[in-house]
Amino acid sequence: MDDRLSRFRDRAQAEGLVDVAYTETDSPVGRLLVAVTDRGLVRVSFQRERRDDVLEELAERLSPRVLEAPRRLDEVRRELDQYFQGERTEFELPLDWSLTSTPFRRKVLERTAQVPYGATISYRDAAEAAGNERAVRAAGTALGANPIPIVVPCHRVLRTGGALGGYGGGLDAKRFLLDLESGRSTVTGG
Amino acid sequence: MAGTRSPHVKLPPFQLLLDRHSGELFRFLSASVGPVDAEDAFQETFLSALRAYPKLRDGSHLRAWLFQIAHRKALDVHRARGRNPIPVEQVPEAAVSVGGDAEPALWRAVRRLPDKQRTAVFLRFAADLDYAQIGVALSCSEPAARQNVRAGLATIRKGWGDG
């Protein structure tokens, strides 16, 4: 059965019939689902989001031709592994912003993508970069809806004064990522 | 890729169709054309389905739709064999009830039925579809689906008795 399915997967790939390829991969912050389109990485989701819900979202918003195709995610998994080992401070993956629907949210996330490894900004900074420093709450919503967490590092956005704020992957994951980037992490082997 | 899909039809991710139905579709194909030809027919079935998937106008009969495609692929195999006939095996004498784990000899008897009867019998007993679903898969009415199953079973029983 596995042979049969992987043969199908290969042929579907070869014929260009897979619009959204995904796989699941283990990480120190739990199992991640990662998905790519021809344009690039389109989605990273944490374990707390149900797999089927994420796949439904991809089918509805991008294309119903969603297939598990681990090999197309090799590069994504490699960069994530390096990041969690403390060996990578920047991702070089092309990104597909299709799941970010409004220009404001896109600006907030693009600003967030520029925050360097180990640094943080405030929600107000993110809002300001998107052209409206008073839209702090909207910036928080944009970050909460970040379809590509970790790679677009919304964990580097904190409350003014340094409180953690929120995180789609849970506050433990946010704390873990910040610790990892500050060199305080005890979990990764490096 | 957004341009190819039809509007207002909510389709599940194709992977879920594969997860849910690949096993039963293979069993159906295996019963219908034998395990060797079933491998290619399986690939062709799911590739055809994936090609057509974003353009589907109706997302409510996906399982029957997949069996409809599988049925056509099985017909292709049977037609190809018709052009290159293979010897017909002896029909065994013992009567066996038709079921999912029925012995291959019985499936061989089913395989000799006319196209619609054969497929209807396989869809009913190898794939466990109800008559409404068989109707969708065979593009006929529910009573016609029922009639095809009945006629197919009658022919097999007769063959068994004559054997």
Image (cartoon, coloured by chain):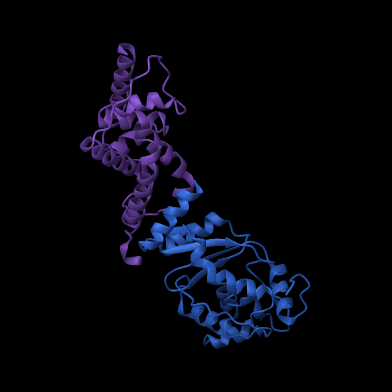
Chain colours: A blue, B purple
What residue lies at 66% left-to-right and 66% top-to-bottom? A27
What residue lies at 68% left-to-right and 85% top-to-bottom? A119
Q: Position of residue A126 (x, y in %)?
A: 59, 84
Determine whether A18 is above or below B137 in the image: below
Q: Position of residue A29 (x, y in %)?
A: 68, 66
The image quadrant of residue B130 is top left
Taking A128 as reference, is A7 left or right? left
What residue lies at 43% left-to-right and 53% top-to-bottom? A7
Residue furthest front in the image: B87
What residue lies at 63% left-to-right and 61% top-to-bottom? A31
Determine whether A41 is above or below B130 in the image: below
Of B92 and A112, the residue lying toward us: B92
Residue furthest left in the image: B83
Determine whether B13 is above or below B23 in the image: below
Of A144 and A135, the residue lying toward us: A144
The image quadrant of residue B81 is top left
Taking B4 as reference, is A142 left or right? right
Residue furthest top in the image: B161
Q: Position of residue A12 (x, y in %)?
A: 39, 58
Which quadrant does the C terminus of chain A fall into? Answer: bottom right
The image quadrant of residue B133 is top left
Q: Position of residue A82 (x, y in %)?
A: 64, 75
